[in-house]
Image (cartoon, rainbow, N blue to C red):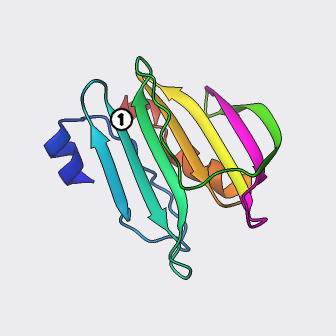
């Protein structure tokens, strides 16, 4: 992650401070671009299964960014506005292809739109997302 910060010159890279033990750290893959707008995708795999189970993307709100995700919902059961540590977020809950749980949350953080997608129930996803929001003393 530090290499991505240095090479891409992206100073504000949002990463979780809470990370479940069921996922491998560091990210299995990081994709980053700075032109025509800043965008970053981090993929994390499950320790036991080895499949991608968490994707975090960050992109300038000025860009039209829709990454091709490896985690896709087969069915969305509910979409709600969710208060995420003072931010207005959108939370989606559903199922993936193999009847695995699917959760996605998106919010704006400064000039970036952050999206976190996970093969899990929303509680774990929200905990990860909340850990990405800087404490007011850090901004």
Q: Is residue 113 left or right of residue 33?
A: right
| Quadrant of the image containing the N terminus | bottom left
* Residue drawn at (72%, 52%) of the image: 122
Disc 1 element:
strand
- Judge the density around disc 1: few (<14), some (14-19), many (≥20) Cα neighbours within 10 Å: many
Main SS class of the magenta portion in the image: strand
Farthest residue to the right: give it: 77
- Check the image and report above or below for 27 versus 65: below
What number of labels is visible?
A: 1
Q: Split into 4 quadrants, where in the image is the C terminus?
A: top left
- Residue 122 vertical position relative to residue 21 in the rendered view, above or below: above
Left or right, 96 with reference to 117: right
**Image height check: is 10 above or below 5?**
above
Indicate the position of residue 48 as horizontal and vertical percent values: 55, 82
Q: Position of residue 11 (x, y in %)?
A: 24, 35
Instruction: Name the residue: 31% across, 25% down.
Output: 37
Above or below residue 108? Residue 103 is below
Q: Nearer the viewer, residue 44 or 111?
A: 44
Camera-side residue of 123 and 53:
53
Residue 63 position by quadrant: top left
Name the residue tied to disc 1.
39
Magenta highlight range: 87-101
x%, y% of residue 120?
A: 69, 60
Q: Residue at x 44, y 57 (%)?
A: 43
Q: Where residue 21 sits in the image (x, y, percent)?
A: 53, 73
Residue drawn at x 71%, y 38% is 91
Q: Is residue 137 magenta?
A: no
């Amino acid at each position: 992650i530090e290499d991505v910060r240095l090479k891409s010159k992206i100073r504000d890279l949002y990463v979780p401070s809470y990370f479940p033990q069921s996922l491998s750290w560091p990210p299995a893959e990081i994709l980053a671009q700075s032109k025509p707008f800043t965008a970053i995708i981090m993929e994390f795999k499950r320790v036991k299964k080895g499949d991608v189970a968490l994707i975090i993307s960050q992109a300038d709100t000025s860009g039209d960014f829709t990454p091709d995700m490896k985690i896709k919902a087969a069915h969305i059961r509910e979409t709600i506005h969710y208060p995420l540590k003072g931010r207005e977020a959108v939370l989606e809950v559903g199922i993936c292809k193999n009847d695995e749980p699917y959760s996605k949350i998106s919010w704006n953080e400064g000039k970036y739109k952050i999206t976190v997608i996970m093969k899990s129930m929303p509680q774990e996803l929200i905990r990860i997302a909340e850990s990405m929001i800087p404490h007011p003393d850090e901004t």
